[in-house]
Image: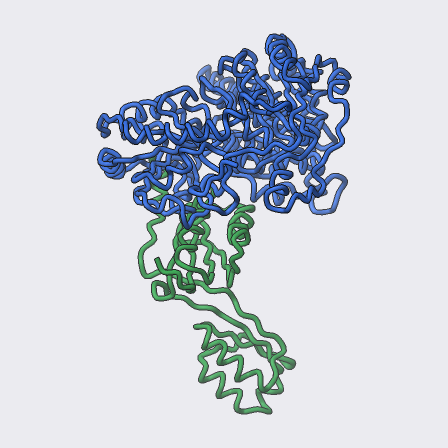
Chain colours: A green, B blue
Amino acid sequence: MSQEVKTFTISVYTENNIGLLNRISAIFQRRHINIESLTTSQSEIKDVNRFVIVVKITEEQAIKVVGQIEKQVEAIRAYYHTNDETIFTESCMFKIKSDLLFEEPQIQNIIKDSDSRIVTVNREFFVLEKSGRRFEIEELREKLEVYGIMQFVRSGRIAVTKDEMKVSELLEEFKNQ
Amino acid sequence: MNTETIKKEVNKAVKTERISGSEAIIRCLIAEGVDILYGYPGGAIMPVYDELFKYRDKIHHVLTRHEQGAAHAAQGYARISGRVGVAMATSGPGATNLITGIADAQIDSTPIVCITGQVPSHLLGTDAFQETDIVGISTPVTKWNVQVTKASEIPEAIAKAFYIAKSGRPGPVLIDITKDAQFEEFDFKYEKCTGVRSYKPIPKTDINQVKAAAALINNAKKPLIVWGQGVILGKAEEELKAVVEKSGVPAAWTILGASAIPTSHPLNVGMVGMHGNYAPNKLTNECDVLIAIGMRFDDRVTGSLDTYAKQAKIIHFDIDPAEINKNVKVHIAVLGDSKDSLAMLLSELKENSHKAWHQEFKDLYEIEYNAVIKNDLLPEKEGLTMGEVLKEINIYSNGDAAIVSDVGQHQMIACRYAKFNQSKSNITSGGLGTMGFALPAAIGAKMAEPHREVVAIIGDGGYQMNIQELGTIFQQKAAVKIVVLNNEFLGMVRQWQQLFFDKRYASTEMTNPDFVTIAKGYSINGKRVTKREELADAVKEMMASKSSYFLEVCVEKEDNVFPMIPSGASVSDIRLS
């Protein structure tokens, strides 16, 4: 098995439970694995949550971590995928002085070219939102940095997998046991 | 209202009853078959203790002298009986004092349920008196935990707790219940838990994997079985014995697997691991097929993984999929409950005896006997050895006693030399190595199975880590036999200092009190033995005693436990001296 450190997206389907985030993050912490990003949300199944966790580890580590996650009582199923096996995106927001919109006409071009969206504008500042790959976000940040950014924030990765994750079937199976 | 609807209304009223959360806790415990619980009262758990008082004829609360003692007693109860042990404590320090026992139960897969009181919910997060985030603290060392803030949530939480603790690979569970939930009244109804949607305790056994395993075993020239506690937890002792007898495969055990097959069984080739027997350790690196059953390839079993059984095809039977390939890469994994998977294996196996292969074990046993065992059991030197104490205990126990050992040299000696005729007889802290485990665990074991002889074997160090539990023995009249093997050292650490730190005995020497007088203070009869000629009579007197008994044996100060696989070395490099 490959000992190469790669970016893996770990998807975890869980019951909605207060303590579970702690349990899951402790699995990484114990093994000294840095969580690059972690996002939790409702999944496609009612009352089932989905964690999307991005880590840089070897495949062997990924298998073990997924095993430990699935061992948690309230974890329904966990999967790991490489970048190629997922479709993923991040989103970010910039808060920028409104004056710049008028003083630096170049900014308007940057916004247009970057496929970003103005969320709000007022006299003091405007807020720009963009979603896309990390490098696209970084590119935009670098371009805007020249003019001054009041605030910048980027979300964790969200990802769907190309393959099916048969969690609904699994839940049916559990029910029939 | 017609008579039918009146009847329905009455039935409804009978099914639910309006009671307090704390009464519900006791009623739930009784419904789960709990007869004994171990604990310590305090502010945030007082409403529950008040109910315990009312139900004291139905459920026996044992006041330990420290919450750690309560957790270990619950472990001892569970380990000897296979039933779920229960410990209870108040919030804050009461709860944190349980943690060592919970961590021990987690790593040794022991089913216990811990109930802790918590400050009233409106005070949560305010740094209230005796408030601690015990759910946060216990998360990494519990199989499952939950905080309950409403009385109506109590029955489901407790039902789930018992179900999770004992099903699949067992483990500790903690329920934290706020004081307001204990006081609150609600309509009580109890239903046992039979499943949790996201939780699959027993993976299905794949018959193809069993067949592949059987084919490997049937064709093996030098197969070796290493079984662990999974056999005991799965109640698969008979199945294992049948597999071993039919296949003729030599079978060795991990420390927690001890007693699943009697020590005297001719195919039982002894203990693996750091201080295990010479033959099974050496031959781990000679076998062609290694069959691991309900064990987890702990580092104290494998030594260096780079040189562990590299020549062998490895088959791993386990209930926990996360154990497969965790430490050792295996060729065939058989998931499932050991009772089922071993029964399936049995029918696929061919009869064999492996005589020549067994002879290799016997030859190596001879070497170990002459180099180590003889000197341990029949010493010619003046000082007493720990081994000869075990030998004497074996004579009077006939192998029927449960041996509860602590952690250190005496533990290794106890596990190496104790005779066991029946399963669940070796109760010791394996994975966590918790000094202070044995005395309270022995109390729990004795109270769970009062008809059984329970002998605690403890070092002078570990004894003093929970010596306060003598008070529990005194109050409960628990007829535990306590043997302290006193070498006035933290012996195992001293041994390492001698072997690996040029004899720099940093903080391992102990100036000990008069242990017999201390025992007498608790009305526990006792004796101190310093000479060989006194030993047999003292052990006989202890074993004959109907009540608890304390025996201190002053053993050689600087004896070492051998064989030994130095930490990080290969099992092949096991040392005899």
Q: Quadrant of residue B510?
A: top right
Q: Is residue B375 visible?
A: yes
User: What is the count of numbered marks?
Assistant: 0
Measuring from the top left, give residue B454's x and y in whole percent.
57, 17
Residue B242 shown left or right of residue A104 in the figure: left
Comparing B232 with B258, the one in front is B258
Comparing B107 with B360, the one in front is B360
The residue shown at (34%, 29%) is B250
The residue shown at (59%, 25%) is B386
Residue B289 shown left or right of residue B386 in the figure: left
Measuring from the top left, give residue B269's x and y in whole percent.
39, 28
Measuring from the top left, give residue B382's x and y in whole percent.
64, 23
Q: Is residue B149 visible?
A: no
Q: Quadrant of residue B223?
A: top left
Measuring from the top left, give residue B226's x and y in whole percent.
39, 33
Residue B113 shown left or right of residue B465 in the figure: left
Up the image or down, B335 lies above or below B540; here it is: below
The residue shown at (62%, 36%) is B100
Up the image or down, B101 lies above or below B10; here it is: below
The residue shown at (39%, 58%) is A59
Residue B208 shown left or right of residue B145 in the figure: left
Comparing B57 with B290, the one in front is B290
